[in-house]
Amino acid sequence: MKTPTTTAIKPRYEILDGLRGVAAVLVVCFHIAECYSMNPVDKLLNHGYLAVDFFFALSGFVIGYAYDDRWQNGRMSVSTFFKRRLIRLQPLVFLSMLLGTALFYFSDCPAFPRVSETAWWALLGSALLSAFLIPQPASMSVRGTDELSSVNIPVWSLIFEYIGNIFYALFLRRLSKRGLTIVVLLFAAMLTDAALSLNLTGILEAHDFPLSLNGGFFFCPEQVYIGMARMGYSFCAGLLLSRLGRFIHVKGGFWWCSLLIAAALCMPCVGGWTHAWMDGVYNAFCALLLFPLIVAVGAGSRICGLRSVAICNFLGEISYPLYITHYPMMYVLWAWIENHPDATASTHITVVSSVFLIDLCIAYAALRLYDEPIRGWLKKRFS
């Protein structure tokens, strides 16, 4: 008599889900702080942009964990993989463009000089290109800030995320651990070049304060180079970690890792204006060593208690909706700050708190009322 076969369900790494949410909340706080100051030395939550490198490392780890064995046993094809990733990522990209379009004209202020003169058809054209993750040159910026997508800037990281996914499906999945290690080392050299502004390739430009790893969101050779270095190293390092399976168990791992992420992202500028290279070293340290270490600890540790598991699950669920939908309200906050220079401190606290809560509510509503139902329908229709 044949024994019934069962499909084993892989355990979830709840701690990694929770850490993704912690980083997403800190990204929102970082962008709120940027509305008050873009000064690279003095702004609050100075290194919040490094959360993207952590996201890339998490993505590489999760992709490897979820899909490596499926390729090996023939249960995964290139087309199926791409459909799964599109279903996971793309619906919220479309929603974020709708939010960015709806709130666009509310961000009119001196910081965004083209808002008032942008015709509706130009806005819709820019939003449509961004919805399909098509990079836009500075000449097409509808906000006047020359961002790769001036309707909702966080989609820049989704472009690199898709590039990483394409590389994985076509190339990286076929590599042995040794081959992947070589790729990681090559990207490590590229990331070090960008972080320390060594300019070994001649692509980097001169700036009053070196960009280090705070780049990737404009459409020019330098920014593409920085973006590829950030995604390439972190994604491949996360993928390699998943294949090596050598994780670190720490008691209270979620809380220690959360503290490390918060400390890394909130660290003030190292070295100031006169020793900018020191801040570059700090950027490189976080991306090259600290974030992979945190992923290894998060994967190797366990979380106990229903409440702690529920917290991690909630943070994991809301992380992507919060990251991809929060920035349209940042544009509105920025405009309010510039248009109300005499507002009292208590008013600023009220407005900032309101924007933060609105972003959380939008993210939760987007998850429950839009993303989950849409993804459920798409899975039934195309999987």
Image (cartoon, rainbow, N blue to C red):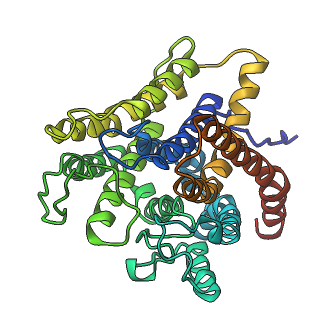
Q: Quadrant of residue 77?
A: bottom right
- Residue at the location (59% across, 65% down)? 107
- Above or below, 153 relative to 184: below
Q: Locate residue 355, reporting x and y percent.
A: 67, 46
Q: Is residue 281 left or right of residue 90?
A: left
Q: Residue furthest front?
A: 342
- Residue at the location (29% across, 40% down)? 41
- Residue at the location (68% across, 36% down)? 315
Picture quarter with the C terminus: bottom right
Q: Is residue 313 left or right of residue 327?
A: right
Q: Residue furthest top?
A: 251
In this rendered view, identify the residue nearer to me: 268 or 177: 268
Q: Locate residue 90, reporting x and y percent.
A: 65, 65
Q: Quadrant of residue 108?
A: bottom right
In this rendered view, identify the residue nearer to me: 159 or 375: 159
- Residue at the location (11% across, 57% down)? 200
Q: Quadrant of residue 216?
A: bottom left
In this rendered view, identify the residue nearer to me: 228 or 319: 319
Q: Locate residue 28, reporting x and y percent.
A: 57, 44
Q: Is residue 201 left or right of residue 77?
A: left
- Above or below, 314 relative to 38: above
In this rendered view, identify the residue nearer to me: 366 or 253: 366
Q: Residue furthest right?
A: 1
Q: Locate residue 344, reporting x and y percent.
A: 59, 39
Picture quarter with the N terminus: top right
- Above or below, 143 relative to 42: below
